[in-house]
Amino acid sequence: MESLKSNFSKSIDPTSSISKWTGRKIGGSHEGTIHLRNGELQFDNDQLVGGKFEIDMNTIAVTDLTGDMQAKLEGHLKSDDFFSVEQHPIAHLKITDVQSQGQHYQVSADLTVKGIKHPVSFPLEVSENGATTTLTIDRSKYNVKYGSKSFFKSLGDNLIHDNFDVEVDLKF
């Protein structure tokens, strides 16, 4: 019988890990990527018990546009209208609770964006070589106001949805 490992961490490989975001607006959406600066998942007896990650906000990229339109949207996302990347270059995610369901977990974590911390919850599937999840994040909780109905009631067709999705494929 194979013995269980206790109290160990697996570091994330930021160069092979992929995070893809999708933001939606009235009549369309935009897609892109963002990269981790570093991170790790913590285990005890081969069960996930914690983890922490740093997200490099300077790496926000738009993948569904090219040329000037791509550069314009990337610049706008990094500006004070959205993520204030110059003042807040790193976002943080720290796992606070894990409920095990075999190799699947329900994770609670604190996500800090623009210096503002809020809880998030998401399913996480862990394998020997990595982990995958999809998070839905409400940008309005992090004071990302631009085009948000939470802050501006009369936007009409200029509305950008508050929730955006991030598909994460972590590699160890």
Image: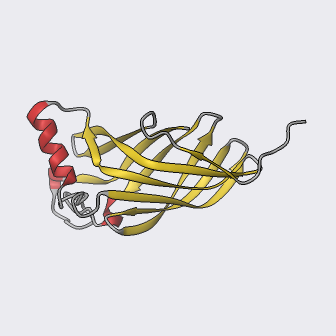
> Residue 98: horizontal and vertical position, in percent?
64, 57
Q: How is the image coloured?
A: secondary structure
Instruction: Give the image quarter of residue 124.
Output: top right
Tell me where residue 59 sits by quadrant: top left
In-front residue for pair 5/153: 5
Quadrant (top left, top right, bottom left, bottom right) of the N terminus? top right
At horizontal 25% and vertical 58% (from top left) the residue drawn is: 83
Q: Identify which residue is drawn at 29% across, 52% down.
A: 161
Q: Is residue 71 left or right of residue 16?
A: left
Which x, y percent locates residue 130? 57, 37
Q: What is the number of callouts on the image?
A: 0
Q: Position of residue 55 (x, y in %)?
A: 39, 51
The vertical placement of 107 against 129, above or below, is below
Determine the residue positioned at 21% across, 53% down.
78
Q: Residue furthest left?
A: 68
Tell which of 3 and 118 is nearer to you. Answer: 3
Q: Quadrant of residue 18?
A: top left
Instruction: Give the residue at the far right of this rendering.
Output: 1
Q: Is residue 48 above or below residue 153?
A: above
Q: Is residue 140 left or right of residue 5?
A: left
Image side of residue 40 versus residue 154, left or right: right
Which is more toward the observer, 79 or 44?
44
The picture places residue 149, in percent across and down from the top left corner, at 24, 61
Tell me: residue 48, above or below residue 145.
Answer: above
Q: Tell me the quadrant of the picture where the C terminus can be found.
A: top right
Q: Is residue 154 left or right of residue 13?
A: left
